[in-house]
Amino acid sequence: MSQDDKVIITCALNGVLTNPQKHPVPYTPEQMAESTKEAYDAGAAVVHMHFRDQQMGRMPVWDPELAQEAVNRIKDKCPDIIINFTTGIIGDDISGPTGLLEACKPDMAAMNSGSINYLKVRSNGDWAWPPLMFDNPVEKVQGYLDVMYENDVTPECECFDMGILRSLSLYEKNGMLKRPFTVSLIQGVQSGMPAREDLLPILIDEMPDDVHWQSIVVGREEVWPVLRKTVELGGDIRTGVEDTFYLPDGEKVSGNGELIEQAVEIVRDVGREPATAKEAREMLFGEE
């Protein structure tokens, strides 16, 4: 089977802010390693991770020792899995996330590629959280890229709307963004791109040529049809408890392994195969 028939599946391991007392979100290094192993055994080649406080597991932290312990435990269980760090932070002080990149040198890291009003409204019209600006101006993007290139970290360009996606070609033309990089289409955030199958061909048309891309879909029942369409159109996919807690039948999952199993089922239903971690390394980084 050719590389074009292989799908790189990423496990979105834990995310941020969701309550571990209510949801199956791993946050200690041991929990993160166990959950990654379940996802890896199910078919994930990449693990995307956040780091949380070790008291309640609710708030993000940028602790190099914690991050390195989590990576070490994960690598003990899954030696060849691709490590992908979050870098998302509000404000112009990026020393926390860039400090983790310098200390741990993951294979990849999220590179939030533009700004968005990050909003959600409840059914009664109230804000789910105070409206906030997830600010990623060009100088902030450049700061991330400088550190990534200095530490041989491949950027995963996260795009919440079409304008951000279209900016990637401008970054590349300007010379600030260099290959290899990957593109992530984040769909389902209320104030960003909707999770719609019919939107995907348009997004692909606006994407830089010849890049690996994946769909990240946030939500419930809308997640799975978009992931299936992504696989049909040649893309890679991400799922995990950062993105959804629900299987297609509406059943709530007990952890990441079940979500990756469902992703693998979709990939094979479409007639493709999940890439192993070794295959994914060759596809993304040219590693033999």
Image (cartoon, rainbow, N blue to C red):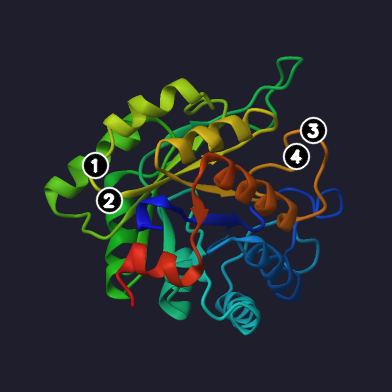
Asked which quadrant contains residue 71, the reply is bottom right
Q: Which mark is residue 250?
A: 3
Indicate which label's residue lies in the foreground, 1 or 2: 1
- Per the model, the C-alpha gap separating discs 2 and 3 is 42 Å
Lower sequence index among marks 3 and 1? 1
Lower sequence index among marks 1 and 2? 2
- Per the model, the C-alpha gap separating discs 4 and 2 is 37 Å
User: How far from the left and from the top, in percent, is residue 224?
Assistant: 62, 35
Answer yes or no: do the residues labelled 2 and 3 have beta carbons within 8 Å? no
Lower sequence index among marks 4 and 2? 2
Q: Is residue 139 left or right of residue 12?
A: left
User: Could you tell me the amino acid type at mark 3?
Assistant: Gly
- Per the model, the C-alpha gap separating discs 3 and 1 is 35 Å
Question: 187 or 58, which lies in front?
Answer: 187
Q: Is residue 11 left or right of residue 279?
A: right
Reading the image, the residue beneath label 2 is 139
